[in-house]
Amino acid sequence: MRDKLNKIKDDFLAGLEKVKDKQALFGLEKKYLGRRGELATILRGLASLGEAERKDIGGLANEIKREFQGRISAFRSRLENQESGREFIDVTSPGRKVEGGHLHPVTLVRNDLEDLFSSMGFMVLDGPELESDFYNFTALNIPPYHPARDTQDTFYVDLPGRDNAGELVMRTHTSPMQVRAMRKYGAPLRCIVPGRVFRAEATDAVHEHTFEQMEGLMVGENISLANLIAVMKKLIAGIFKREIETRVRPGYFPFVEPGIELDIKCTICGGRGCPACKHGGWLELLPAGMVHPKVLAYGNIDPEKYSGFAFGLGLTRMAMMRYGIDDIRLFNSGDLRFLEQF
């Protein structure tokens, strides 16, 4: 019995050296000092011993028990002191500021434009980024042999296990939704379509391979260029909140006839010339025009009865002009020093 008590003491001391926290200490205390612990088992066996031996072993067991209790108490105090020193909280000190996220500058412009066009009765639609060659080109009066495809060099996608070479493309503009929307909603129709587009561009201060556009479409009876220019002026005034000098010049786009380009005087250099405007003082902001009769026909709209206008607004370039950003590559850079300014 004495050997058992000495073995229990040695095991306890060895276990105590391995304790690192209060939970482990509680487990050790329960194992040796609990109601069904090692020492309690020894003490329950005293009844089978003679009187002299019972007195001797009982005294030794109680001595070891007091030693265990003292060591556990001292160890617990040491742990509490360590924890209090490490986790002390000064409730009078100011709290830590919780950093909140915020919207990307292009998203801010997009939200404002969606609100503006919604107030004019336009629907806000969404379209697929992986588009068919038909909707991206052919249905927009850009057949396979048309040279306009060369100006929108892009990314074609082949899906594994499918014979679809040349049929799927990362959309080069948001214009494919013109025909999709006309086929779904018919005429009259007012809608805008914001979203990402992709082109195999050589990047520079004003060109990027991935950027944001917003398509606009209005189809109805007796729609003219005057309606288009009036909407564009309202758009610019609503975004910039100040007078911006604009100019309208002829432009060629296969899916509109006639086509125009609406430029604004560069808000970064004030028209003096800088990399953002290619040193010309003006920035092409909004290619637009009257929807080509062939595009209306592809959309199952009668071009003899209805007309319409369409535009492709560069959301990323709009954000550049609104916030005075001189390099388009900053938007997708992921640089927090840039993004946290907005």
Image: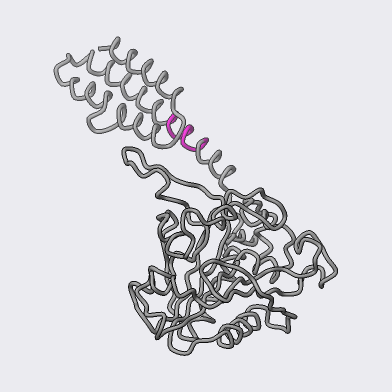
Which of the 4 quarters of the picture holds residue 232?
bottom right
Q: Which of 137 and 145 is in front in this view?
A: 145
Q: Is residue 88 left or right of residue 53?
A: right
What predominant SS class does the magenta segment belong to?
helix
77, above or below 90, in the image: above
> How far across and down, in percent of the image, does residue 198 sit?
54, 54
> How far across and down, in percent of the image, does residue 334 sit?
62, 51
Q: Residue at x 17, y 14 (%)?
A: 50
Q: Is residue 76 left or right of residue 226?
A: left
Q: Nearer the viewer, residue 189 or 336?
A: 189
> How far across and down, in percent of the image, does residue 19 sit?
44, 28
The segment highlighted magenta reads 70-78
Q: Which residue lies furthest to the bottom in this view?
A: 222
* Residue 162 is a magenta residue: no
Q: In this view, does 307 lie to the left or right of 31?
A: right
> If the image is split into quadrants, where does the N terminus sit?
top left
* Residue 73 is a magenta residue: yes
Q: What's the coloring here?
A: one colour
Count of number-bearing discs: 0
> How far across and down, in percent of the image, does residue 54 sit?
22, 17
314, above or below 1, in the image: below
Q: Which of 277 and 48 is in front in this view?
A: 277
Q: Is residue 72 left or right of residue 37?
A: right
Which of the 4 quarters of the picture holds residue 210?
bottom right
